[in-house]
Image: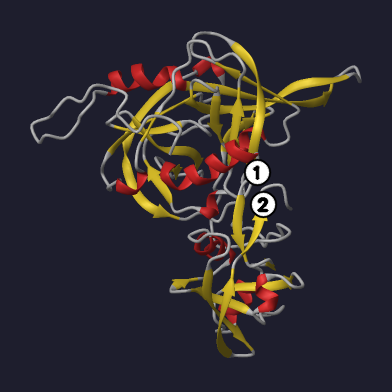
Amino acid sequence: MRKFVAIAGISLVSAIVGSLTTVAAIPHIYPNSGNAALSSTLGSTKPVLPVSSAASGAANFPVAEIAKAVGPAVVGVSNFQTSRGFAGNSGLQEAGSGSGFIIDAKKGYIVTNNHVIEGAQKITVSLSDGRNLDAKLVGADARTDLAVLQIADTSNLTAVSLGDSSKLVVGEPVVAIGNPGGNNFARSVTTGVVSATNRTLNLQGESSFNLIQTDAAINPGNSGGPLVNYQGQVIGITSAKYALQGFEGMGFAIPMSDAMPTIQQLINSGVAKHPALLVSVNDEYLSYAQANNKPLGAYIIDVVANGPAAKAGIAKGDVITKINDGQVQNSSDLVRELYKYNVGDKVKVTFVRDGQTHEVDVTLGEITSNQR
């Protein structure tokens, strides 16, 4: 697996990323060149299965029925890139594979993770009925680790049903379906519970969300696959796992309700738009701050001229500690707090300069998924 040690958040203008030295290896979960790498209007909001009432009156579907209903909507996703062979010739070779799921059967839209298709020169998807089809990349967003694909042949497709991830409770049973290790283990089903909600990872893409933690087995190749509740509804997109030796049952999924606005933007226009201060930040400051009893926060290393932050008087060297009432202790916190709002919203930014705390009102600007 490609392992990241303490990766900190995303630059809001140029994707300058600072490194943190405080977390352990947290890989995405999709194999790359044989090595495991860390890695609405769409879909029905009704359960995909007829509701059966348990003694408590709650819907309760056996795992076998969930797998039968949702499995046909789960696809394998293969990433092909140019590779030079032993004889010196070059051609497209499978560089990695992951999972995805059909979100709109009529139009052939498929959701997966950005890191599954990143760098691909050709993308193919494998369906449950044995078809292998070329897929078009509709749009991808590294900042949220989301991507949407589309296939032209929409005959006999099955779409998932979407659930409300904001209503999840700790201990709730869930099912993960995906292609761990590739198509040889396509549509593998694992079960578990919601171990926790509102988890954060300092990992590009995943750092934009408060994630769902689950003990359902998540393995290389599961990236982009659905995490499903016991009503047969997709409530998460499996995307990462905690891979330190000795740790088991710590997988993570992007909440579906949080992902949908970005997915809808990618479908509508091919790009995702995010609120931004238009600053660059670096978390190398954090070790200095901890050693010298300085306030933790997002340390600004650059400010875009005439951008929202610059117009409000925020400058290079300032340390942002709050967005409205949301605490900011690093660059990942800054991104998560900003993504709670929309482009054009006015927020109060608290920052420290030369030991003094300041507050300014900032009207959030815009950064898109095709901007670096």
Q: Position of residue 370 (x, y in %)?
A: 71, 47
Farthest residue in the left direction?
A: 55
User: Disc 2 marks which amino acid?
Assistant: Thr
Nearer to the camera, 217 or 263: 263
In the rendered picture of this protein, how many numbered marks are placed on residues? 2
Nearer to the camera, 8 or 369: 369
Q: Position of residue 334 (x, y in %)?
A: 55, 66
Which secondary structure lies at badge 2?
Answer: strand
Left-right relation of 243 to 71: right
Q: Is residue 333 above or below residue 55?
A: below
Nearer to the camera, 3 or 120: 120
Task: Report which quarter residue 313 is drawn in.
Answer: bottom right
What residue is drawn where x is 46% and y is 72%?
327
Q: Is residue 236 above or below residue 330?
A: above
What residue is drawn where x is 50% and y is 75%?
322
Q: Position of residue 135 (x, y in %)?
A: 65, 22
Residue 189 in view = yes
Farthest residue in the top direction?
A: 130
The residue singled out by tag 1 in the image is 271
Q: Residues under labels 1 and 2: Cα distance?
A: 6 Å
First of labels 1, 2 by sequence position: 1
User: Disc 1 marks which amino acid?
Assistant: Val
Which secondary structure lies at badge 1?
Answer: loop
Left-right relation of 88 to 24: right
Cβ atoms under marks 1 and 2 closer than 8 Å: yes
Q: Is residue 355 above or below residue 132?
A: below
Q: Quadrant of the N terminus?
A: top right
* Residue 358's disc number: none
* Label 1: how many Cα within 10 Å (few below 14, some 14–19, many 20+): many
* Residue 368's disc number: 2
